[in-house]
Image (cartoon, rainbow, N blue to C red):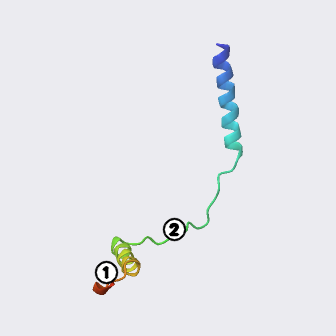
Amino acid sequence: MSESDLLCRMFQAWREDIDSVPFPQFRELTIPLQKTRAEIDLARRSTARAANPVRRADSGW
């Protein structure tokens, strides 16, 4: 029983420690605007065009 009592006291001390810290208060919650799938696809296509320039036929070996 002494182990159980020790665990209960440790748990109670932990609870008191947690409860002694005030929970943060937020006046205003700021959530950034989320991009739509179409916006993400458009951005990927535009970077893909810039990353892969058109290959010329006369630049071969």
Residue 53 lies, with reference to residue 6, above or below; the image says below
User: x, y (%) of residue 31?
Assistant: 51, 68
Q: Given the image, on which type of amino acid does mark 2 rest?
A: Ile
Residue 1 lies, with reference to residue 49, above or below; the image says above
Residue closer to the observer: 45 or 17 = 45
Could you say whether the residue bearing mark 1 is in a helix, strand or loop?
loop
At 34% across and 70% down in the image, what residue appears?
37
At 36% across and 80% down in the image, what residue appears?
49
Q: Label 1 neighbourhood size at 10 Å, few (<14), some (14-19), many (20+)?
A: few
The answer to whether 6 appears left or right of 50 in the picture is: right
Could you say whether the residue bearing mark 2 is in a helix, strand or loop?
loop
Tell me which corner region of the image, top left, top right, bottom left or bottom right, holds residue 16: top right
Cα distance in 3D space between marks 2 and 1: 51 Å
Would you name the residue on which mark 2 appears?
31
Identify the mark at residue 60; answer none if there is no mark: 1
Q: Given the image, on which type of amino acid does mark 1 rest?
A: Gly
User: x, y (%) of residue 19?
Assistant: 67, 42
View extreme (front): residue = 61
Residue 3 lies, with reference to residue 45, above or below; the image says above
View extreme (left): residue = 57
Residue closer to the observer: 49 or 29 = 49
- Quarter the N terminus occupies: top right
